Amino acid sequence: MAEAKFHYGFLASHHLELDIFRSHLPAFEFSIQKATWGKHRWEAIYGYPLIGLSVWYSPMGGFPEIGSAVAVYPYINFPLIQDQKQSMNFRLGVGLAYLSNYYHPTENYKNFAIGSNINIVGSLYLEYRRKVSRMITLSAGLGLTHFSNGAIRTPNYGLNIFTANIGITTYLSKPNPQLSKKMLPEVYKFEFDGKKTIDVDFGFSLGMKDMSQQYGERFMIYAIYANVFKQISWKSKFGLGLDLTYDASDKFLLEWNGQTLDNNAELLKPGISAAYQLVISRLSFVFNFGVYLAGAERSEGDIYQRLTLRYLFTKNLFANIALNANWGKAEYIGFGIGYQLNVIYKRTVKH
């Protein structure tokens, strides 16, 4: 299926320095998508969502300091309520974006929002879809598009764009008449089979924090962690996270402020967090909300959040990308690998 959307909305000012860019703006989106029908169990569990690839463009209000934006991202469109003719959906997309202009200390000093051409884009939409014929579906929705580089290059206030949209979708060929006859497969690898388990994720990640705008330096960040999960359904796991982080910028900041350390171990930040994992077969989203228990430098605060996109390559080995933040302010993006240990404590499965 091919889909075209027209968006109209505004660039939100979430920092005083971005007030000069408050404006209304259009955006245009073209997508290629397909309907799922139950080939994998997760498709049935999530109500047979649409999956697709989208190209998004906006002139961003015509401000030369910001320029224009082009984004490309895959997405999943989850039905919340649906019948044969209509549905209410939540669409989630994550990908990469190119912004034509970014901050420069002399040539573009007003753009405190973005410090690099290449950024991560996140797209969240709530939309209503209705079939008007066998080949055509119309849609309307509200949503948020967010651009950020995760503090790889500063400044990085990010851009938040709220829009309303209308769209039209058409099949590129005649739809399969059997598509409405969904199927539920047998248990698949990487999926919850009803056994009682405790899952433990051990991981390591590496990131970089750019503070060149303030101090002319970039710093490496190293983190190890463990998440202990109890799976309560096909979709959800809840648990507890333990973290240990070494941020090289902490030592620099302490010395900059005239403080000395007896031992570099004082820079280590142990943390504990509540954890939730949303499972979509091999792919999952992990959310941690925690507090640092120690650490010589905690000027950004004790509370931290982490959003992780995780992918299982085998039953046990995974790779992930994590955005780490303090109360919504992006600190750094970490790239890592890990091992998932599944401990079965009850094998009896009720039918």
Image (cartoon, rainbow, N blue to C red):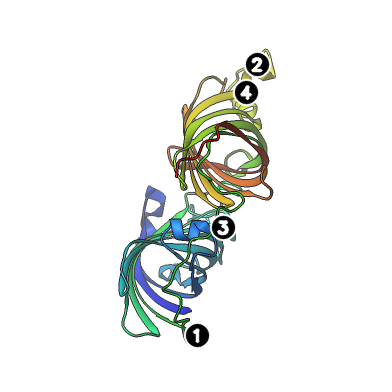
Q: Is residue 2 above or below residue 102?
A: below
Q: CA distance from mark 2 to mark 3?
A: 36 Å
- Answer whether labels 4 and 2 touch (C-beta < 8 Å): no
In three-dimensional space, the C-alpha distance between marks 4 and 3, rounded to whole angstroms, equals 29 Å
What kind of residue is marked 1? Leu
Q: CA distance from mark 4 to mark 2?
A: 12 Å
Q: Nearer the viewer, residue 200 or 347?
A: 347
* Spot occupied by residue 202 in the image (x, y as percentages of width and height): 64, 34
Find disc 1 in the rendering and name its residue.
172
> Which label sits in the foreground, 4 or 2?
4
Instruction: Mark 1 or mark 3: name the one nearer the start of the chain.
Output: 3
Instruction: Give the structural element (helix, strand or loop) at label 3.
Output: strand
In this rendering, the label closer to the viewer, 2 or 3: 3
Mark 4 residue crowding within 10 angstroms, few (<14) / some (14–19) / many (20+): many
Mark 1 / mark 2, whichever is N-terminal? 1
Q: Which residue is identified by label 2?
A: 261
Crowd around label 3: few <14 · some 14–19 · many ≥20 (10 Å) = many
Left or right, 345 with respect to 223, comes to: left
In the visual, does 28 lie left or right of 130?
A: right
**How far across and how far down the image is residue 235, in percent?**
46, 47
Inspect the image, locate mark 3, and give the three-letter code of the amino acid beneath it: Asn
Check disc 2 and report its element: helix, strand or loop. Answer: loop
* Mark 4 residue element: loop
Q: Which residue is mark 4?
A: 268
Mark carried by residue 119: 3
Q: Amino acid at mark 4?
A: Leu
Instruction: Measure the alpha-carbon separation of dots 1 and 4.
Output: 56 Å
Q: For the residues carrying marks 1 and 3, which lies nearer the camera in this image?
A: 1
